[in-house]
Image: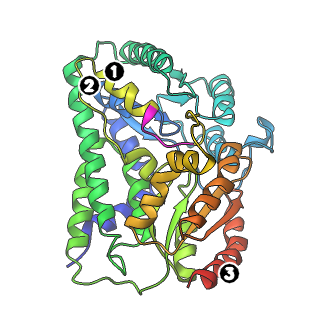
């Protein structure tokens, strides 16, 4: 049986902007956003098309260096380069959260040079205290009002709750998809999952849920795994959206079976609770449930206890998906992830899961030289 949904995923990955441009042609407003901290539920509730901004490792930087330093996050530079070259001209606006310094800095540069119809900076606290939660809820109220001004109407609590349910359904479908990775060998490859995650970030949630259901049906139609039994890896890192990197790891001789990356579990392994005031549920979920190095969580106990409270979810991933090793892929100049990487490697190795920390610069060339490191690591964990 033809795997129609997976073929559609491939097409969306090749033509990432096609559906958004089509919907804009039908009169919809398309709003781009960076990072996992922007609540797409509010955009969906307003009838907007949420579009997650990503880069393209196969396109070298050609214009961005005239506007931004070369010593900033190569992912952010790549995204801005696409924007300054006009590739994001179909966006009606963009949203930047306070996730890291590089993302914060690109907000004013993007706004000044590209002058979008709509722009918003979402100030996300870096702590999870009660005061931070109250502050963030107020920020979400300001954000919601800016979206209401954009669409020219108020967003009701009922519309927000309906949008929350749709996005929670998406998260449940993603978890169901990831279940196929627990088999040894897995029924679905890491690169197929990565393509799917990229594809659903470019289309409305209703479309993405239908696509996910189709992919799940395609995988259920496989009578056995089409993949060899190889070392099982977990990939950890920040904004990894480059499918060629996952393909390289798997072609080198591994199965990527679980991840902790921004387009993967980091954005989708939790739900937003339905609350009387929907902003309460959204604030609690987006501030407290996303496991990102940019957020400071209260340290307590011994060093081992502290590491377990911060990174225990990674150990549980490694155990649940029976991994042989962990590949910690850090994008160059990403200080937040660089600071945590050694602690995570140490913590997971003590739990019996060897780790390798590597740094890439978000280019196709870096994937080639990373291949040697991957080969050596696979020989160690095989």
Placement of 224 over or under 355, stated as above or below: below
Q: Residues within 10 Å of mark 3 (few under 14, many from 20)?
A: few
Which span is picked out in magenta? Answer: 288-292
Placement of 129 over or under 262, stated as above or below: above
Q: CA distance from mark 1 to mark 3?
A: 48 Å
**Residue 300 location, quadrant:** top right
Please identify the quadrant where the N terminus is shown: bottom left
Q: Residues within 10 Å of mark 1 (few under 14, many from 20)?
A: many
- The earlier-in-sequence mark between 2 and 1 is 2
**Foreground residue among 307 and 356:** 307
Count of numbered marks: 3
In this view of the protein, can residue 303 be seen by the observer?
A: yes
Across and down, in percent, residue 266 comes to 45, 47
- The earlier-in-sequence mark between 1 and 3 is 1
Across and down, in percent, residue 227 comes to 39, 83
Tell me if residue 144 is in the magenta stretch.
no
Labelled pair 2, 3 in contact (Cβ < 8 Å): no
Placement of 232 over or under 20, stated as above or below: below
**Image side of residue 97 versus residue 337, left or right:** left
Residue beneath label 2, please? 160
Labelled pair 2, 1 in contact (Cβ < 8 Å): yes
Marking on residue 376: 3
Q: Residue at x 34, y 21 (%)?
A: 279
Q: CA distance from mark 2 to mark 1?
A: 9 Å
């Amino acid at each position: 049986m033809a795997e129609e949904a997976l073929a559609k995923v491939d097409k969306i990955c090749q033509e990432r902007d096609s559906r958004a441009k089509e919907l804009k042609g039908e009169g919809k407003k398309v709003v781009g956003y960076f990072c996992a901290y922007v609540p797409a539920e509010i955009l969906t509730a307003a009838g907007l098309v949420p579009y997650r901004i990503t880069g393209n490792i196969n396109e070298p930087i050609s214009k961005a260096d005239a506007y931004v330093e070369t010593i900033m996050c190569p992912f952010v530079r790549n995204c801005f380069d696409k924007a300054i070259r006009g590739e994001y001209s179909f966006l009606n606006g963009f949203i930047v959260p306070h996730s890291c310094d590089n993302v914060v800095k690109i907000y004013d540069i993007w706004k000044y040079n590209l002058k979008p119809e709509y722009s918003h900076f979402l100030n996300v606290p870096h702590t999870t205290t009660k005061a931070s939660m109250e502050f963030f809820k107020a920020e979400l109220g300001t954000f919601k009002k800016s979206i209401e001004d954009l669409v020219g109407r108020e967003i009701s609590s009922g519309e927000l709750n309906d949008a929350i349910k749709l996005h929670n359904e998406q998260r449940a479908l993603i978890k169901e998809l990831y279940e196929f990775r627990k088999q040894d060998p897995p029924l679905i490859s890491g690169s197929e999952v990565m393509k799917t995650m990229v594809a659903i970030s470019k289309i409305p949630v209703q479309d993405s849920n239908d696509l996910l259901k189709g992919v799940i049906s395609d995988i259920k139609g496989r009578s056995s795994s089409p993949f060899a039994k190889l070392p099982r890896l977990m990939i950890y890192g920040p904004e990894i959206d480059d499918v060629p990197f996952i393909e390289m790891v798997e072609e080198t001789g591994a199965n990527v079976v679980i991840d902790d990356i921004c387009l993967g579990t980091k954005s989708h392994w939790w739900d937003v609770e339905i609350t009387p005031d929907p902003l309460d549920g959204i604030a609690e979920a987006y501030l407290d449930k996303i496991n990102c190095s940019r957020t400071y969580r209260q340290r307590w106990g011994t060093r081992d206890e502290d590491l377990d409270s911060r990174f225990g979810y990674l150990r549980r991933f490694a155990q649940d998906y029976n991994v042989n090793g962990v590949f910690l892929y850090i994008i160059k100049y990403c200080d937040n992830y660089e600071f945590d990487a050694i602690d995570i490697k140490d913590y997971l190795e003590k739990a019996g899961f060897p780790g390798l920390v590597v740094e890439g610069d978000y280019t196709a060339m870096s994937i080639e030289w990373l291949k040697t490191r991957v080969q050596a690591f696979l020989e160690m964990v095989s």
